[in-house]
Amino acid sequence: MSDAHAPPTLTAGRIPDASGADEGWLRLEGASAGAGEGAGTLRFGGEWTLATATELDRRSHAIDPQAVAAIDLSAITRMDTAGAWLIHRTVAELRAAGREIEANGLSTRFHSLFDEVGRTDRPEQLEESGPGWLEDLLYRIGEATFGLAREGRRLMSFYGMLLVKGGRLFVQPHRLRLTSLVHHLEQTGLYAVPIVGLLSFLIGIVLAYQGADQLRRFGAELLTVNLLGLSVLRELGALMTAIIVAGRSGSAFTAQIGTMKVNQEVDAMETMGLDPVDILVLPRILALMAALPLLTFLSDIIGIIGGGLMSWAVLDIPPDAFARQFREAVPIQHLWVGLIKAPVFAFIIGMVGCYEGLKVTGSAESVGAQTTRAVVEAIFLVIVVDAGFSILFSTIGI
Amino acid sequence: MDADTADQPIIRIRGLHTRFGRQVVHEDLDLDVRRGEVIGVVGGSGTGKSVLLKEIIGLLEPAAGSIEVLGHDTGTLTTSGWEALRRRWGVLFQDGALFSSLTVAQNVQVPMREATDLPRPLMDELTRVKIGMVGLPHFACMRFPSQLSGGMRKRAGLARSLALDPELLFLDEPTAGLDPIGAAAFDDLIRGLQQSLGLTVVMITHDLDSLAAICDRIAVLVDRKVVVDTMEALMDMDHPWIRSYFHGPRGRAARRSHANVPH
């Protein structure tokens, strides 16, 4: 046991008895301290395993190469790859320091492992050395810019292809996958009703409450109805629904199509002469374009109901007065302004969702990455297009 | 090696029952794996080979029975006991199961970082040793799993499973999906590592060539139990599934080609 805690170097004495040692040790024997060019024997013994590798690593670095004349490995009782590597490295470093040394005495049962580990000793890097931070920053900015332009171009060409293939449906209606269309209508439309309804109701309540709070100062509580009607019908109904659907269905499109890409289902489809755009993309987009206006209408109604209830509660505007004011203040065109945007939003969400899904490559990891991209891109584009609509409508005076 | 445990089985399974709902997969299954042997686990689809492996390594809990690995009853182990035990074995999953966000070198270092306090330079050196031992070219260290071929991913997975110098190695279909030359090379690699590291290897395989080339004994899962013997002895058995497995055209070819290889 004393061997295990012996000083790492320069121990003079007899050959140690290794039988009791369970820790690995190494020591230099037969050299006198300060002799420099010595004739010491470096002895390795005990268990050279991963468990004590940290300590052995430290000790092996502390050896003075000039003091070593011979190496004796005969006292090693156990060895794994970590130990074999440390021994190999120590010997190699001594040789590199100019000592003509042979490692002797290793028990034959360790030979194959020792040789195996020695064979792996090649100079190689584990990490690529990267560029400096400024270069790296410029590189990233440039890459992102070009990536954005490239992405935009690809999305536009995907848009063009959708128009062509969508137009072909009018000429050849038999290409339309009706079952798939109905399925997606159910998934994206019907099943979105509860969440869209609930959120719209809450938005209506918030809007009415905030509006009432401000307008009451001017004694214009009744104008809350105008505020509510205009903002819900023109903007919030369509926008909120589009954002909910982008998160709910746009991401689902990417994940579904992406998973099929990973599974090579899309490849299989193409080799069978089936067009993935016809089968996967168009039914989804068409279903969404049908579902989103319906959901938007639902959102409008429920949002106004929520606002109306709030007005009743805080402003004491009874439902019949609310309805009367609503009919006078909010002409029907505001409903159309909101509803007409819905199919466009639906097209954007569906297109981006399917495009990102088809862009998935190989790994399951990329499904997740593309799904995130799809949602962010879809919401971004929806809001940009909504801003465009606002400008358009104010220009033509609606 | 502790003298008192040297001749005890490294894995000892007694009275193992596994059920999924009403479906009984294992019934009163006994299995001993001896220290230092390579044991192949075969069986038809759905006979519970992978389930057995998962039960041994603690990913699934059996309905009944005891499993002792390296002298510890896995049914009664504490959390810290499990942790210590899991560091003594390595598992190679079918497609390597490498962490896709890490490079091969980082993958191999995951167990080292978690389980040891090795200094960084030594860890890098050992990583190089492991990656070299499994025969991966040096450029593979910096690659991500998605940039590697299936065979290279398996080798990288093997390097990771060897990271902590385990006593026991579990392989789930190590040669599935490899071309015959790659599969034979992988067999040689496993045998070579097993001999130089003194490993005990439990491998699930359908590859009759692997069985003939590197397995000391074969465990056949039939009738919800396991039959363990050498390939020669199994050849002479009367059980219909075992007969058709080893005496089919593939079985005969594998036996012929490895008849002269001494192991």
Image (cartoon, helix red, strand yellow):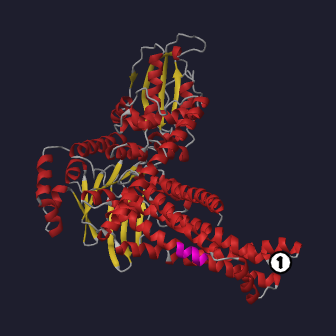
Q: Is residue B104 above or below residue B218?
A: above
Q: Provide residue A329's location: percent of width, then percent of height.
A: 73, 77
- Considering the whole magenta stretch, tell me its main secondary structure: helix
Q: Amino acid at mark 1?
A: Glu
Q: Is residue B193 left or right of residue A197?
A: left
For disc 1, the neighbor class at 10 Å (few under 14, some 14 to 19, many from 20) is many
Q: Quadrant of the N terminus of chain B?
A: top left
Count of marks overlaid on the render: 1
SS of the residue under disc 1: loop
Please name the residue shown 35% across and 67% down the image: A170
Q: Which residue is mark 1?
A: A221
Q: Is residue A195 visible?
A: no
Q: Is residue A300 above or below residue A267?
A: below
Q: Provide residue A127's location: percent of width, then percent of height.
A: 49, 33
Q: Is residue A61 above or below residue B28?
A: above
Q: Please give the range of residues in magenta.
A: A293-299
Asked whether A253 or A226 is in front, the reply is A226
Asked whether A390 or B113 is in front, the reply is A390
Q: Provide residue B181's location: percent of width, then percent of height.
A: 22, 42
Q: Quadrant of the C terminus of chain B?
A: top left
Q: Provide residue B177's location: percent of width, then percent of height.
A: 27, 51
Please name the residue shown 57% across and 73% down the image: A296
